[in-house]
Image: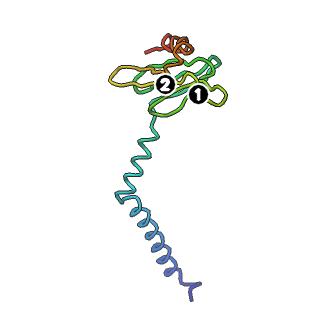
Amino acid sequence: MYAKNYFLKMIILFAATFAGLFAVWYALIRQESVDWLVGQVAHQVSPYAISEIDAGLIITNVVAGYEFKLPQGFKTLGARNLSFYLEDGGGKKCEIRHKSAGGNLFFELVNEKETNICRRYLEQIRGSLRF
């Protein structure tokens, strides 16, 4: 009976498809799901593009329109609040936070005790800054 009744099979197929679409729609339209999706998108967006060259890394802020070069050996961390550091035996050395707020650029040394060691890196970064 079911083998030749294609109309019944089509009705079951459409009903299953509609039920699946409704389940996905309901899962996405709930306020908790919307908040979660918006939170994921907001956390993933980064204004920085990072390019690797032989001499180090080039950090470009594609939204604000500036770039600077990191000396060789520096690694980056973060998406919106960028920081960069030298890795020293599994630890961070010369960790620098970078912020862009209100048209001002900030390069802040996390550990101020390393000022003498990291001063030349900060000067290289400042010298490579281009708008």
Identify which residue is drawn at 57% across, 89% down. Answer: 1
Above or below 97: residue 6: below
Above or below 92: residue 29: below
Amino acid type assigned to the residue bearing label 2 in the image: Val
What colour-coding does the image apply? rainbow
x and y percentages locating residue 46 in the rendered image: 46, 34
Q: CA distance from mark 2 to mark 1?
A: 10 Å
Identify which residue is drawn at 55% across, 28% down. Answer: 76
Q: Nearer the viewer, residue 15 or 93?
A: 93
x and y percentages locating residue 130 in the rendered image: 46, 14
Asked whether the beta carbons under mark 2 and mark 1 sit within 8 Å of each other, the answer is yes
x and y percentages locating residue 70 in the rendered image: 56, 19
Q: Is residue 118 left or right of residue 36?
A: right
Q: Is residue 92 left or right of residue 96?
A: right
Near mark 2 (Cα within 10 A), the count class, few <14, some 14-19 or many ≥20, is some
Q: For the residue labelled by badge 2, is the local secondary structure a helix, a strand or a loop?
A: loop
Amino acid type assigned to the residue bearing label 1 in the image: Lys
Q: Give the numbered dot on residue 92.
A: 1
Identify which residue is drawn at 50% across, 74% down. Answer: 13
Q: Quadrant of residue 19?
A: bottom left
Q: Residue furthest left?
A: 102
Q: Nearer the viewer, residue 60 or 84?
A: 84
Q: Residue furthest right?
A: 89
Q: Earlier in the sequence, mark 2 or mark 1?
A: 1
Identify which residue is drawn at 57% across, 84% down. Answer: 4
x and y percentages locating residue 82 in the rendered image: 48, 29
Near mark 1 (Cα within 10 A), the count class, few <14, some 14-19 or many ≥20, is some
Q: Which residue is mark 2?
A: 110
Q: Nearer the viewer, residue 58 or 98?
A: 98
Q: For the residue labelled by badge 1, is the local secondary structure a helix, a strand or a loop?
A: strand
Q: Residue furthest bottom?
A: 1
